[in-house]
Amino acid sequence: MLSALSLAGYAQKEVRSQVRKGNKQFAKERYSEAEIEYRKALELNPNDPETNYNLANTLYRTERGEEAGKIYQELMKEIKLMPKERAADLAHNAGNLAMKAKDYQSAIEMYKESLRRRPTDEETRYNLALAQKLLEQQQQQGGGGDDNQQQQDDQQKQQDDQQQDQQQQQQPQEQNDQQNKEQQQQTQSQRMSQDNAEKILNAYIQDEKDTQRKVEQMKQQQQQGRKSRPKNW
C-alpha cells in the first residue's frame, strides 16, 4: 500500500514539474516547447485539468483551434466543479474560440457562463455585446441583396478584428503576474490520444531548427560575456 502511494506521489510530482516547464516556455511564447512539456505531463496523468487546459491554450495560440475546442468542450462538462475564477477563464476562452469560428450563438452562451461566475469582468462583457451585435447582423444577412450583404460582411470583419485585439491573452495557471495582466489563468482536461508520441515527435521536429539557432546565439553571448561579466559574490 505504501509503495503504491509513494509511486502515485512521485508521478504527481513529475506532472507538476513538467507543467511548470511548459508554463515557462508558454510565457516566453515558445509554444512548440510548451506543447512537448504538457504532453509529457499528460502521459503521466491524462485527465489532469490544469495540464489539459494549458495544452488547449497552446494549441489555440498556434492556430489549432479545432484541437483546442475539443479540450475546452471536455472541460466545460466539469465547469460546475471548478473554482469560480477558473470556470470564468474557461468559459471566456471557449467564447473567444467560438467567436473566431463565427459561431456567435455559442460565443454568447459561453460569455454569459463566464459572467455568471465573474460579473465584473468588463472584457467579457464587451465581447458578449459584440457577439450579440454580430449575431444580429448575421441573422439579417439572409434577407438583403448582394451589395447589402457585402457591406455587412465588411462591417463584421472590422468588428471581428476589434474583438481579436480585445481578446484576453491566455496563459497557464501558474503565470498570472502583473506584467501579463491581459492573460488569463487556465486549467485543462482531455484524454491523451494514442498518437500522442507522434505529436510530441512532430513538435520536436518543428522546433529543432529554432532551437539550434538559439543555442548558437547563446554560445556567442557566453563567449562575449566572459570578457565583461562582473563576478558575483
Image (cartoon, helix red, strand yellow):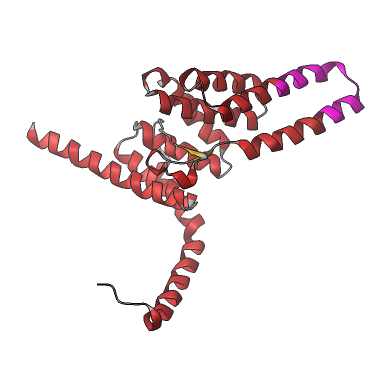
Is residue 133 shown above or below 179?
above
**At which x and y percent is residue 147?**
91, 28
Q: Is 157 left, or right, of 224 in this rendering?
A: right
Q: Nearer the viewer, residue 78 or 173?
A: 173
Q: Main secondary structure of the magenta part?
A: helix
**Image quadrant of residue 85?**
top left
Q: Which residue is pictured at 82% across the width and 20% down the height?
A: 141
> Looking at the picture, how far across and down is residue 185, in whole percent?
43, 36
Task: Give the quarter of the figure containing the N terminus.
Answer: top left
Is residue 150 on the magenta stretch? yes
Is residue 43 rendered to the left or right of residue 182?
left
Can you tell which quarter of the image residue 87 is in?
top left
Q: Is residue 160 visible?
A: yes
Magenta stretch contains residue 147: yes
Question: What x and y, as percent, mark residue 166?
Answer: 62, 37
Relative placement, left or right, of 201 versus 230 is right
Q: Is residue 200 visible?
A: no
List the single residue furthest toward the bottom: 227
Pick the quarter of the image with the C terminus.
bottom left
The magenta-colored residue range is: 133-152
